[in-house]
Image (cartoon, grey):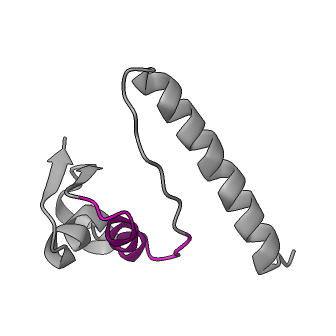
Amino acid sequence: MVFRKKTIKKVCEAYAKDVFKKAAVALGAAVKAKTLHIANSNLSEGILDGAKNAKADVIVMASHKRTGIKEILLGSETHEVIVHSKLPVLVLG
């Protein structure tokens, strides 16, 4: 099955919209969060681009705490963001 870029983009945007909506409900009305969807197949680049475009003060990420061979083979998007970010990065475990 061949997907067109336009179709993939629409699906990704719809998914992001749903995630943002659920996050807003979880945060509650007292917390106002700015959302930004950046389409990028490289996650760490997308996170860094999004932070730059949003003029963020800090990047907050979760860590899967992979160790050993899994960390070597799979890499770590959090690690890539930490290494390449000019902003402070807060990692939640």
Quadrant of the rendering where the N terminus is positioned = bottom right
For residue 82, what is the image quadrant? bottom left
Q: Please provide percent x and percent y for residue 89.
A: 16, 58
Q: Nearer the viewer, residue 12 or 17?
A: 17
Q: Is residue 50 magenta?
A: yes
Task: Count all numbered tags in the image, as a single digit.
Answer: 0
Q: Please provide percent x and percent y for residue 91.
A: 17, 50
Residue located 76% across and 63% down the image: 10
Relative to 46, 56 lies left or right: left
Q: Is residue 69 magenta?
A: no
For residue 79, what is the image quadrant? bottom left
Q: Nearer the viewer, residue 55 or 64?
A: 55
Residue located 27% across and 60% down the image: 56
Relative to 56, 14 lies left or right: right
Residue located 29% across and 71% down the image: 75
On screen, 76 above or below 20?
A: below
What residue span does the magenta drawing correspond to? 39-56
> Magenta part mainly helix, strand or loop?
helix
Residue located 51% across and 67% down the image: 38
For residue 43, what is the image quadrant? bottom left
On screen, 40 above or below 51?
A: below
